[in-house]
Image (cartoon, rainbow, N blue to C red):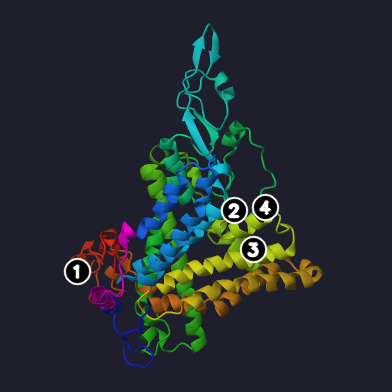
């Protein structure tokens, strides 16, 4: 859906237009294209037909019906066809919604293939569930506890701990729940399957998240895995109070950091157009090209990590504190929301492989590794071979590149989606190059002090990203991703660090909702619906 930008950003050397003016121009262009019928906005429910089809199909039992199970192929074909059409026809005057439309369409193709082809959830997936136990009662001088109802699946009696206490209520009986027979239980089971990307609380959870808490694991009777791989996000909280005390202050700090980075970046035309020839703001004019390059890389990377952390913290607060397991189910207990990121030690000790494999959030790891794992389970690949390991790297990063390229494809301004894909495709090369070097000089490296080895890993990772990040970063800037204003209250602008006419409240995007009609009338009734960008910033 990309168009040539209406701004002379590659020829003009005067002052750049303000970001808010750029956003309004993009919105005006989108309205013109919408009126001409060359583009379609993100509309509910039309944009969500694919995920609804996947959800409905998975809610239909097929373990005992080969015909219904075989129907997964036409279901997958229908989803891929529809989502590809969305990639080619959908955009938005809001750069964030335009990017979301592409990423969501590409991701749903990957997710559908995961649960329809590479995995068999109705046959193999198990979800941690719980039932409330009755109180311990005293009968004839002897104590006994009874479970309320019969737990489905691999239920556990689990009354041992109760026999030493009297009058205890509110104890939970945990069990592994397979695909439910009851539709009422099946709907939340499938919903959790499709929304729980890392698999916390499922038998397919990735190894880079914490294991089930020990008391629950002991009650289930599962073996204790003392050799669970290290690295990744292993910090979590067992109570909603502790969860809130950690995430709420963190949310505030992240909010302030994102606000500061947005205010700083808004003065640099790079964050509106990508590479350009506009005049630089005074504080950047004396920087050398290399220093300017490093500065933009650092600020962009910092803002990206902060914004993702802010989003994860907000999601954890809403899911656990405001709603919690009583509303959403047992896989929304506090321990089911561990830290999204690993420790910096993962980079110091693991280099580039540690960055991607442990430190970076692992939200899509299961789906990205599903094709290779499928081939290994079927015996087509040796899971211990170097070939399989290399293939897994390229398949995983290739799928990640496809998803990010989808976000680039649906932007209005002129972008290069293949740049985003290429950034991810070269990451395996960096990992393999690093590992080959370390293997070749293993004996010499082992004699170096630990501090020197860690500095070397961090330096290699930094240099590698300095060389490769512009492929993704420049394309994101061209597409207008840094134009996104998610924060209605801006302390840095209120304190005078923004533009002269900016204040505490950044409401021009929010108050312009009247410019975007709530209802979109498509060519057919099934294409009509509520415009998603009517509820978001421009």
108 or 467: nearer the eye?
A: 108
Q: Which one is earlier in the sequence, the residue at label 4 or at label 3?
A: 4
Q: Which one is earlier in the sequence, the residue at label 3 or at label 2?
A: 2
- Which mark lies nearer to you, 1 or 2? 1
Can residue 131 be seen in the rendering of this structure?
yes
- Which mark lies nearer to you, 4 or 3? 4
| Residue assigned mark 2 | 208
Residue 93 numbered tag:
none
Asked which secondary structure carries label 4, the reply is helix
Q: CA distance from mark 1 to mark 4?
A: 54 Å
Q: CA distance from mark 1 to mark 3?
A: 47 Å
Asked which secondary structure carries label 3, the reply is helix
| Residue assigned mark 4 | 377
- Which mark lies nearer to you, 3 or 2? 3
339 or 421: nearer the eye?
A: 421
Counting from the top left corner in percent of width and height, residue 339 is at 51, 53
Q: CA distance from mark 4 to mark 3?
A: 13 Å
Q: Which one is earlier in the sequence, the residue at label 1 or at label 2?
A: 2
Numbered range of the magenta stretch: 26-46
| Residue assigned mark 1 | 515
Q: Are marks 1 and 3 in contact (CB under 8 Å)?
A: no
Q: CA distance from mark 3 to mark 2?
A: 16 Å
Q: Is residue 329 above or below residue 197?
A: above
Q: Is residue 243 above or below residue 376?
A: above
Q: Are marks 1 and 2 in contact (CB under 8 Å)?
A: no
| Residue assigned mark 3 | 392
Q: Are marks 2 and 4 in contact (CB under 8 Å)?
A: no
Q: Residue furthest left?
A: 514
* Residue 39 is a magenta residue: yes
């Amino acid at each position: 859906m990309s168009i040539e930008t209406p701004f002379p950003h590659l020829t003009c050397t005067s002052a750049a237009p303000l970001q808010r003016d750029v956003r309004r121009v993009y919105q005006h262009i989108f309205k013109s294209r919408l009126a001409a019928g060359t583009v379609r906005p993100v509309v509910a429910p039309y944009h969500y037909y694919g995920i609804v089809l996947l959800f409905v199909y998975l809610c239909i039992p097929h373990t005992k019906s080969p015909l219904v199970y075989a129907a997964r192929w036409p279901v997958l074909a229908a989803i891929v066809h529809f989502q590809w059409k969305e990639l080619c026809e959908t955009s938005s005057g809001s750069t964030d919604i335009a990017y979301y439309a592409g990423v969501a369409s590409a991701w749903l193709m990957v997710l559908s293939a995961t649960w329809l082809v590479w995995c068999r959830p109705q046959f193999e997936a198990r979800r941690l569930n719980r039932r409330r136990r009755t109180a311990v009662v005293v009968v004839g001088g002897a104590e006994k506890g009874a479970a309320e109802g019969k737990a489905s699946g691999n239920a556990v009696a689990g009354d041992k701990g109760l026999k030493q206490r009297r009058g205890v209520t509110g104890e939970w009986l945990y069990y592994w729940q397979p695909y439910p027979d009851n539709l009422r239980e099946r709907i939340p089971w499938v919903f959790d399957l499709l929304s729980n990307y890392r698999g916390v609380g499922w038998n397919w959870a990735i190894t880079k998240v914490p294991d089930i808490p020990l008391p629950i694991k002991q009650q289930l009777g599962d073996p204790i895995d003392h050799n669970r791989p290290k690295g990744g996000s292993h910090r979590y909280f067992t109570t909603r109070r502790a969860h809130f005390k950690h995430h709420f202050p963190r949310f505030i700090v992240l909010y302030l950091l994102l606000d500061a980075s947005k205010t700083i970046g808004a003065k640099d035309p790079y964050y509106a157009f990508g590479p350009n020839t506009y005049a630089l703001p005074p504080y950047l004019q004396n920087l050398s090209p290399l220093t300017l390059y490093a500065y933009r890389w650092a600020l962009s990377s910092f803002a990206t990590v902060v914004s993702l952390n802010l989003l994860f913290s907000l999601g954890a607060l809403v899911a656990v504190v405001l709603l919690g397991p009583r509303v959403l189910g047992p896989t929304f207990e506090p321990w089911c929301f561990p830290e999204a990121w690993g420790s910096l030690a993962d980079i110091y000790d693991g280099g580039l492989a540690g960055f991607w494999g442990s430190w970076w959030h692992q939200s899509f790891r299961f789906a990205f590794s599903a094709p290779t794992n499928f081939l290994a389970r079927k015996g087509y690949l040796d899971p211990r071979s170097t070939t399989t390991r290399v293939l897994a790297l390229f398949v995983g990063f290739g799928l990640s590149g496809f998803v990010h390229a989808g976000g680039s494809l649906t932007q209005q301004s002129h972008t290069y989606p293949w740049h985003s894909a290429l950034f991810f495709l070269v990451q395996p090369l960096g990992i393999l190059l690093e590992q080959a070097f370390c293997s070749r000089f293993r004996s010499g490296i082992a004699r170096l002090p630990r501090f020197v080895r860690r500095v070397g890993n961090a330096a290699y990772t930094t240099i590698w990203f300095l060389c490769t990040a512009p492929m993704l970063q420049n394309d994101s800037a061209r597409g207008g991703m840094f134009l996104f204003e998610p924060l209605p209250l801006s302390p840095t602008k209120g304190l005078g660090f923004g533009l002269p006419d900016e204040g505490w409240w950044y409401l021009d995007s929010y108050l312009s909702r009247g410019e975007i009609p709530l209802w979109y009338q498509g060519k057919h009734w099934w294409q009509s619906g509520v415009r998603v960008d009517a509820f978001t910033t421009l």
